[in-house]
Amino acid sequence: MSIDEWWPRLSPSTQASIIANNGDALSDGIRDEVVAAGGLPLRAETGEEETEGWFLDDAAVDWIEARANDEE
């Protein structure tokens, strides 16, 4: 399922949190809501603490950035 299909299923507070922290690891609660909405976060384990966790893919991060900037 593409992000334009599952994004509207997220609560406004979750959308705002993802926008504010776009590209960062997702908290467990936000990851669970994204999965329940149909998104598929990716697991990153590089051994570097700041890159461990669940992330949205690059296309989703770009989509969110464009939406946050009112771009098409």
Image: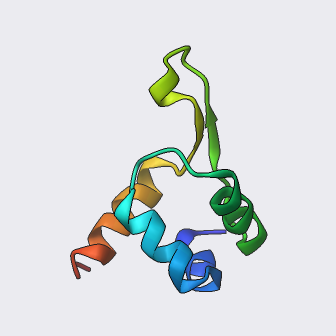
**Colouring method of the image:** rainbow
The residue under the point 60% across, 80% down is: 5
Please indicate whether residue 8 sits to the left or right of residue 70 in the image.
right
Q: Which residue is more in the foreground, 3 or 46?
A: 46
Q: Quadrant of the N terminus?
A: bottom right
The residue under the point 43% across, 75% down is: 16
| Above or below: residue 49 compared with residue 68 | above
Q: Which residue is more in the foreground, 66 or 47?
A: 47
The residue lying furthest to the top in this view is: 47
The residue under the point 74% across, 60% down is: 32
Horizontal and vertical percent position of residue 39: 66, 63
| Above or below: residue 31 compared with residue 54 | below
| Above or below: residue 4 compared with residue 38 | below
Horizontal and vertical percent position of residue 2: 59, 69
The residue under the point 39% across, 67% down is: 19
Q: Quadrant of residue 31?
A: bottom right
Please indicate whether residue 71 sits to the left or right of residue 4 in the image.
left
Q: Quadrant of the C terminus?
A: bottom left
| Above or below: residue 52 compared with residue 62 | above
Question: How many numbered discs, if any?
Answer: 0
Q: Quadrant of residue 69?
A: bottom left
Please indicate whether residue 35 sits to the left or right of residue 61 in the image.
right
Horizontal and vertical percent position of residue 36: 78, 69
